[in-house]
Image: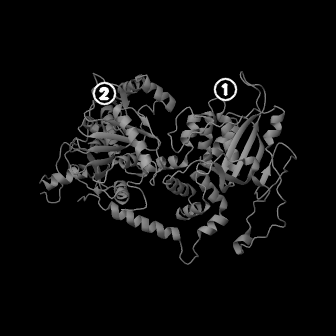
Amino acid sequence: MYVAVKGGERAIDNAHAWLAEERRGDAGVTELSTEQIREQLALAVNRVMAEGSLYDPDLAALAIKQARGDLIEAVFLIRAYRTTLPRFGHARPVDTAAMRCERRISATFKDLPGGQVLGPTFDYTHRLLDFKLAADGEAPRMPAPPAESQPVPHVTGFLNREGLIEEAAPDDTPPPDLTREPLEMPASRPLRLQSLTRADEGFTLALAYSTQRGYARNHAFVGELRIGAVAVEMDIPELGFAIEIGEVTLTECETVNQFKGSKTEPPQFTRGYGLVFGQSERKSISMALVDRALRWEELGEDFTGAPAQDTEFVLYHADNIQATGFLEHIKLPHYVDFQSELELVRKLRREAGAGDTPEQMEAAE
Amino acid sequence: MSDDYNFAYLDEQTKRMIRRAILKALAVPGYQVPFASREMPMPYGWGTGGVQVTAATLTPDDRLKVIDQGADDTTNAVSIRKFFERTAGVEVVTSTSEASIIQTRHRIPEEPLSDDQILVYQVPIPEPLRFLEPRESETRKMHALEEYGLMHVKLYEDIARHGHIATAYAYPVKVEGRYVMDPSPIPKFDNPKMEMAAIQLFGAGREQRIYALPPWTRVVSLDFEDHPFDPSKAEHPCALCGAADSYLDEVITDDQGGRMFVCSDTDYCESRRAAGHRGELAEDAA
């Protein structure tokens, strides 16, 4: 005898309780604190802040803990929290030329004003598992404190003096806000950049990689990659001037791309731009490459049909919260739709004479 | 009710923005109004569009019913109902006639709705032309120019190939002779019910669209003169309440190919049983 399935409510409660227990893991192992996550899993924290579009290392660490280390789930927690926050106003554009750089490299010039600063990078490490870390986590201290910082001008500025790179004139038009207005096509560059900076790192990486492999190939040099803290300033109407309200760490990447010229533009270098919260090198370089690929129209290049050139394709599929939600929703019940498909397929099969064996005929009844 | 959030979770500014979109949608029936959908605390695909529309529509005096697949007790319906209990503190009900707002996924209740009710649909893909043309910029143009030839060709090809229109759910409709609209993935059996007394609002969160049908809007399921629309369903009565006019779920009862058909609308089925109707497999039936 069939009894209609009841108790969805109890099932949900139990599932949540079980989840909480699983999250904690073996109670004999010391619990992870959010401070530990913030300090020792900083790159995960950075990714969650970047894709969650909220600069708050403590909340990001909490989200990672709550999400059991699932970073997309953590991004989701941050996004859902972010929407509830009131909006007081807008900061002034941050001045990345005044960044206190802890890392700054250029792949286009051997030496340059401000110098090459490797900073804390994996780049030249040998990827050998360090079993000492498993035994005791005591880190060696850095030998010497970093030198006094000097001004670090942007590399693209040098090229600009010669007129070799396209102009990027300052523009004070208020940028559109992806989180307050629906995304509509065609999307302007500020909107595209806004979408890319919070886009899924993996998706952005794959698209950028595809341009390197020939899908809208546009050879990119890393003109500059810089990581460091910048001041955030905000105009306070009551005061009549801007005050510094805090500091954020950013990764900025400017690529210099070869360009043979088009009907509308002379031969020159062109730019791709990436700017991401935290130390997020892979993401910011990927972002710069994808940004450059999306600019084919304004530069008068051909549309080769490559995914990375296709603004609708890129922007509508770059958000991992949208993507994972829609993907995973197919776990939800679809009895009703499936039932109507069942009826249809049975009907079509009946008429096509497919179910001619007695067994199938019976099954189709 | 939780005091940590504004009534029905969303802040008042956001609700006002959504209400404006709803009003525009009601003024241009079947037209997809872009709106700045917010991230909600449930994932996209779980009904964030419907939840935002419900949140913007709810008042403290409302009585909310939430169904998924026609049932009040499916896990996602339970979860959304709990969400509004917690953030809005409104009364929740399972009876269709007692509810003032009904949020639904994939079904229209069997019991006819009245003019003091609002039916809110959760919509995954609001664009009926999406699977024919993936580009939003193109489909918006097609709607603007009322260029629906592609859809008719698709339906025609179905008939040429299968002898039928091979769309069983999310069956496209034309609204007031103007916009072709996706009715959300309801079975086509439900399409004729869309000409109703209640207001129907459709929310697509991930796709950032709201559309609507004011009461008694003309809603015509696309078809051809010689292949009229056929809102078919399983040809059985409900095994529990005996209803012959309701949409049925097929339930597998054993591994010998045994199965039974029961109402997908649980409230409808329960009310009928309470009124003494019995199907052939009802517990107290002979």
Closer to the camera in the image, A291 or A128: A291
Quarter of the rendering occupied by the N terminus of chain A: bottom left
Left or right relative to B35: residue B218: left
Q: Is mark 1 in CB contact (under 8 Å) with mark 2?
A: no
Q: Residues within 10 Å of mark 2 (few under 14, many from 20)?
A: some
Q: Which residue is mark 1?
A: A302
* Three-letter code for the amino acid on which mark 1 is drawn: Asp
Answer with the quarter of the image where residue A178 lies: top right
Q: Chain of mark 1?
A: A
Relative image position of residue B62 (x, y in whole percent): 28, 52
Q: Which residue is mark 2?
A: B176
Residue at 55% across / 58% down in the picture? A74
Closer to the camera in the image, B9 or B125: B9
Q: CA distance from mark 1 to mark 2?
A: 42 Å
Question: Of helix, strand and loop, which one carries label 1?
Answer: loop
Query: How does the figure colour the protein chain or chains?
Result: one colour
Q: Is residue B111 above or below residue B152?
A: below
Q: Nearer the viewer, mark 1 or mark 2?
A: 2
Does mark 2 fall on the same chain as mark 1? no
Can residue B257 be seen in this snapshot? no
Q: Is residue A33 above or below residue A262?
A: below
Relative image position of residue A237 (x, y in whole percent): 59, 48
